[in-house]
Amino acid sequence: MNSMNLMANNYLTSYYSSISKASSSQVSVYGSTSAGQAVDAIGIQFVLQRWTGTAWVDAGASSDNGTNKASHSATKTFSVTQGYYYRAKTTHWINENGTYEDGVYYTNSLLVEK
């Protein structure tokens, strides 16, 4: 679990994401977001990134959210090209009574082998 800067948050208590190989041409990204209480809206923004050899570039995006609950989790599947390293950048957010809080988590990198 990630606890960086969570002391400043009133509602967002923890968040996490992970990446795994789904097939020879797809990866799955799992994310979870937790609040200390049921909130108006809670969600995850998924961004898949590919390593070019010099930089991480965005290679896909998706999102998932829920309402009136204290936690939310989702898994998204992305198509990938073999021979590259991939990771996910996930932004975990809540909105409660006009207050917006978020946190960013990076997964480990994963080589999609040929």
Image (tube, rainbow, N blue to C red):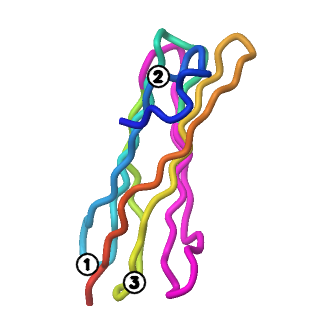
Residue drawn at (55%, 71%) of the image: 59
Q: Callout 2 environment at 10 Å: few (<14), some (14 to 19), or many (20+)?
A: many
Read off the residue under disc 2: 13
User: Mark 3 or 2 closer to N-term?
Assistant: 2
- As helix, strand or loop, the secondary structure at mark 2 comes to strand
Which is more toward the observer, 17 or 7? 7
Residue drawn at (59%, 25%) of the image: 94
User: Mark 3 or 1 closer to N-term?
Assistant: 1
Residue drawn at (56%, 14%) of the image: 39
- As helix, strand or loop, the secondary structure at mark 1 comes to loop
Read off the residue under disc 1: 24
Read off the residue under disc 3: 84
User: Split into 4 quadrants, where in the image is the C terminus?
Assistant: bottom left
Image position, residue 20 (x, y; %): 28, 61
Q: Callout 3 environment at 10 Å: few (<14), some (14 to 19), or many (20+)?
A: some
Q: Which portion, as a residue range, is magenta?
A: 44-71
